[in-house]
Amino acid sequence: MTRGRLEAFSDGVIAIIITIMVLELRPPHGTTLADLAPLWPRFFAIS
């Protein structure tokens, strides 16, 4: 596999992972900044 193909493949895999991570985020029920506090671990989770 050439370097260009490997870069394209890894870019595609990362794009799919980021899309799945974003789809799992839920909007907060409130409208204040304090309502976002319980969601911070999900922003920084690496799985």
Image (cartoon, rainbow, N blue to C red):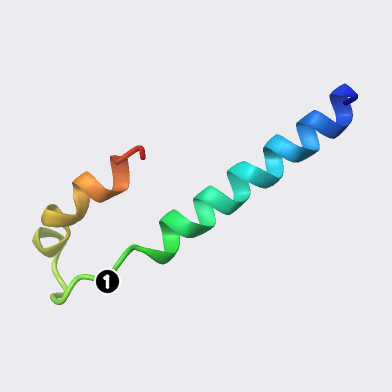
Q: Residue at x 12, y 53 (%)?
A: 37
Q: Nearer the viewer, residue 43 or 9?
A: 9
Considering every residue shown, the one lying at the far front of the view is 1
Residue 6 occupies quadrant: top right
Quadrant in which the C terminus appears: top left
Counting from the top left corner in percent of width and height, residue 9 is at 75, 39
Taking the spot 42% from the left edge, 54% from the top edge, the residue there is 21
Q: Is residue 2 left or right of residue 40?
A: right
Looking at the rendered structure, the kind of residue marked 1 is: Pro
Q: Residue at x 36, y 63 (%)?
A: 24
Q: Foreground: 45 or 35?
A: 45
Q: Is label 1 in a helix, a strand or a loop?
A: loop
In this rendering, would 43 be left or right of 16?
left
Q: Which residue is mark 1?
A: 27
Crowdedness near tag 1: few (<14), some (14–19) or many (≥20) residues, C-alpha within 10 Å: few
In the image, taking residue 33 as reference, residue 47 lies left or right, namely right
Q: How many marks?
A: 1
From what the image shows, is residue 4 above or below residue 24?
Answer: above
Q: Position of residue 29 (x, y in %)?
A: 15, 76
Residue 38 lies in what quarter of the image?
bottom left
Residue 8 against residue 4 in the figure, above or below: below
